[in-house]
DNA sequence: ATCCCGAGGG
DNA sequence: CCCTCTGGAT
């Protein structure tokens, strides 16, 4: 049986991660909320850097949901080919744009349930849109947040992304959700990437004072 | 559990 | 070569 951290221990680990990246912010580039949704949809299993390379031309050619909804699917694929999973993503982008256009009047929904009805939008994507676009507290659980939570034993090894989210949200006050989420992403990306799995996770944290 | 998938790093 | 990258649908 794996032994998990107590609430106090887990909060201290999160606090130390936050201390390393106190001003962390999202690294995806976007202007409108519709474009934010597009960028997050594209970012699955891909680095933000790769997404940011494709979005300037994409945003220019598809300025709003109506234009993307009418676009040729092959043309959308050509815009995003370099980010991987491009056929699935192109289909989801077009279908989502269609629904945003004629069901939501071009507006991006502000609640998780509705966002998750859109093709290609799961809990992680919905949470990013809520937090980044609307400043609504949410913790999006991606590969980094999952890995960090498991290595420090904040959650069990088999925890689902939803379970990780619940655990982190119960540990932290809402006001800290977005900041801590961003700090965990950068800590996972730059300080404790996946390949460091044989090292002591605490060796990546600042010393206790 | 499997599929989608190109780019970058080691 | 192999692993990983802000996942989601089937």
Image: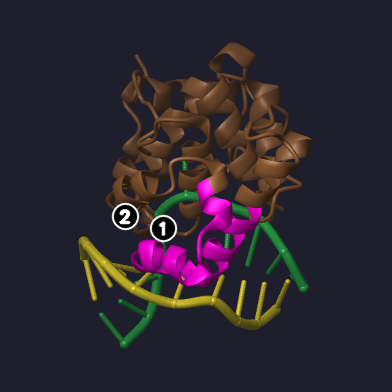
Chain colours: A brown, B yellow, C green
Left or right relative to A24: residue A42: right
Q: Position of residue C7 (x, y in %)?
A: 58, 52
- Disc 2: which chain? A
User: Which label belongs to residue A50?
Assistant: 2
Left or right relative to A191: residue A151: right
Q: Position of residue A38 (x, y in %)?
A: 50, 46
Give the crowd class for mark 2: few <14, some 14-19, many >=20 residues within 10 Å: some
Does the magenta portion include A156?
no
Q: Which quadrant holds the C terminus of chain A?
A: top left
Q: Is residue A83 visible to us here?
A: no
- Disc 1: which chain? A
Q: Are marks 1 and 2 in contact (CB under 8 Å)?
A: yes
- Secondary structure beneath dot 1 equals loop
Q: Is residue A140 above or below residue A78?
A: above
Front one among A69 and A84: A69
Give the crowd class for mark 1: few <14, some 14-19, many >=20 residues within 10 Å: few
């Amino acid at each position: 049986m794996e032994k998990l951290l107590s609430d106090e221990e887990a909060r201290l680990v999160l606090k130390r991660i936050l201390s390393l990246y106190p001003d962390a912010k999202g690294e995806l580039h976007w202007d409108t909320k519709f474009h934010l949704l597009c960028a997050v949809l594209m970012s699955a299993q891909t680095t933000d850097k790769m997404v940011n390379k494709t979005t300037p031309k994409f945003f220019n050619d598809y300025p709003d949901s109506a234009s993307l909804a009418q676009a040729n699917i092959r043309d959308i694929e050509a815009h995003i080919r370099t980010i991987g999973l491009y056929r699935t993503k192109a289909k989801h982008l077009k279908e989502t744009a269609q629904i945003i256009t004629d069901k939501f009047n071009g507006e991006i929904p502000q609640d998780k349930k509705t966002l998750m009805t859109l093709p290609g939008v799961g809990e992680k994507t919905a949470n990013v849109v809520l937090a980044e676009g609307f400043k609504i507290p949410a913790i999006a659980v991606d590969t980094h947040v999952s890995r960090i939570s498991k290595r420090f034993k904040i959650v069990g090894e088999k925890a689902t992304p939803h379970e990780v989210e619940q655990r982190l949200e119960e540990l932290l006050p809402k006001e800290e959700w977005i900041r801590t989420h961003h700090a965990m992403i950068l800590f996972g990306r730059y300080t404790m990437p996946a390949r460091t799995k044989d090292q002591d996770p605490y060796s990546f944290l600042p010393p206790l004072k």
